[in-house]
Image (cartoon, helix red, strand yellow):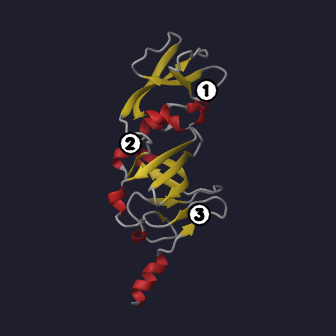
C-alpha cells in the first residue's frame, strides 16, 4: 500500500511555470520531474531556459512549445520555438507520433505549395496566402493550393499535404491545434 502511494506521489500534476502554463499530468509527463512511468511515450515534455511553456519534441526533431492542454477534449495547442511553423513543416511527420492535426470539419488533407516571390502578389481570388514570418523586403513567401500554377516571378520551395484549416490564414500561423487519439488514453478523462 505504501509503495502504491509513493508511486502516485511521484506522478502528481505540476505546472511548468507560474504564469499561463498548462498543468502537466497523465498522459503527459515532465522530464526531470516525473518518472517515465507517469506518462505515455511521445507525451514527454521538457524545460527550456527563459520560457514560460514546456517543450514537446515531435518526430524529426521538431520541437514546439505547449501553450495549452485540454485533457477533456484531448487537444493541445502548440507554437513554434522561433515563431514560424512554415520553417518546420517540411520535417514534421505526425504519423510517427500519438498526435494529429486538430481539424474542425471532417476533411482530408489538401496539397499546398510554398512559393518564394521576388515581388508581392495581387491576390484577388484568395489563391495565395502570405507567410509573413518567412517574408521580408527582398522577397515574399506564399502558400497556395498545389493545383494552381505559381506566377512567373515565383519559385516553388516545397509541397506539403495538410488539413485546409491550417493553411487558410498563414498571417496568423502562430499556434496550431493537435489532438491525440482517444483510445490511447482510455478513461483518463470522462
The residue beneath circle 3 is: 16
Q: Position of residue 135 (x, y in %)?
A: 61, 26
Dot 2 or dot 3, earlier in sequence: 3
Residue positioned most to the left: 183
Say what secondary structure mark 1 lies in: loop
Instruction: Compute the Cα span from label 2 to label 3.
Output: 26 Å
125 over 168 or under it: above or below: above
**Which disc, if any, is residue 135?**
1
In the picture of the structure, the residue carrying the numbered disc 2 is 93
Report the Cα–Cα distance between label 1 and label 3: 33 Å
Residue beneath the point at 51% across and 15% down: 154
Rounded to the nearest whole Å, what is the CA distance between mark 1 and mark 2?
24 Å
If you read the primary sequence from the N terminus, does the residue marked by circle 1 or circle 2 appear first?
2
Circle 1 crowding by C-alpha within 10 Å: few under 14, some 14–19, many from 20: some
- In this orientation, which residue lies closer to the viewer: 113 or 91? 113
Tell me: residue 5, above or below residue 69.
below
Indicate the quadrant containing the N terminus: top left, top right, bottom left or bottom right. Answer: bottom left
N-term mark: 1 or 3:
3
Amino acid at each position: 500500500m505504501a509503495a502504491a502511494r509513493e508511486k502516485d506521489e511521484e506522478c502528481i500534476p505540476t505546472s511548468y511555470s507560474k504564469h499561463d502554463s498548462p498543468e502537466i499530468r497523465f498522459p503527459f509527463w515532465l522530464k526531470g520531474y516525473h518518472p517515465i512511468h507517469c506518462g505515455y511515450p511521445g507525451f514527454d515534455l521538457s524545460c527550456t531556459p527563459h520560457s514560460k511553456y514546456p517543450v514537446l519534441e515531435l518526430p524529426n526533431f521538431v520541437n514546439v512549445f505547449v501553450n495549452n492542454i485540454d485533457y477533456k477534449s484531448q487537444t493541445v495547442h502548440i507554437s513554434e520555438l522561433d515563431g514560424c511553423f512554415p520553417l518546420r513543416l517540411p520535417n514534421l511527420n505526425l504519423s510517427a507520433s500519438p498526435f494529429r492535426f486538430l481539424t474542425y470539419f471532417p476533411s482530408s488533407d489538401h496539397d499546398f505549395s510554398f512559393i518564394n516571390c521576388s515581388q508581392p502578389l495581387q491576390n484577388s481570388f484568395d489563391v495565395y496566402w502570405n507567410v509573413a514570418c518567412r517574408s521580408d523586403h527582398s522577397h515574399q513567401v506564399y502558400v497556395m493550393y498545389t493545383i494552381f500554377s505559381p506566377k512567373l516571378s515565383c519559385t516553388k520551395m516545397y509541397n506539403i499535404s495538410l488539413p485546409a484549416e491550417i493553411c487558410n490564414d498563414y498571417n496568423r500561423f502562430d499556434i496550431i491545434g493537435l489532438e491525440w487519439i482517444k483510445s490511447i488514453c482510455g478513461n483518463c478523462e470522462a
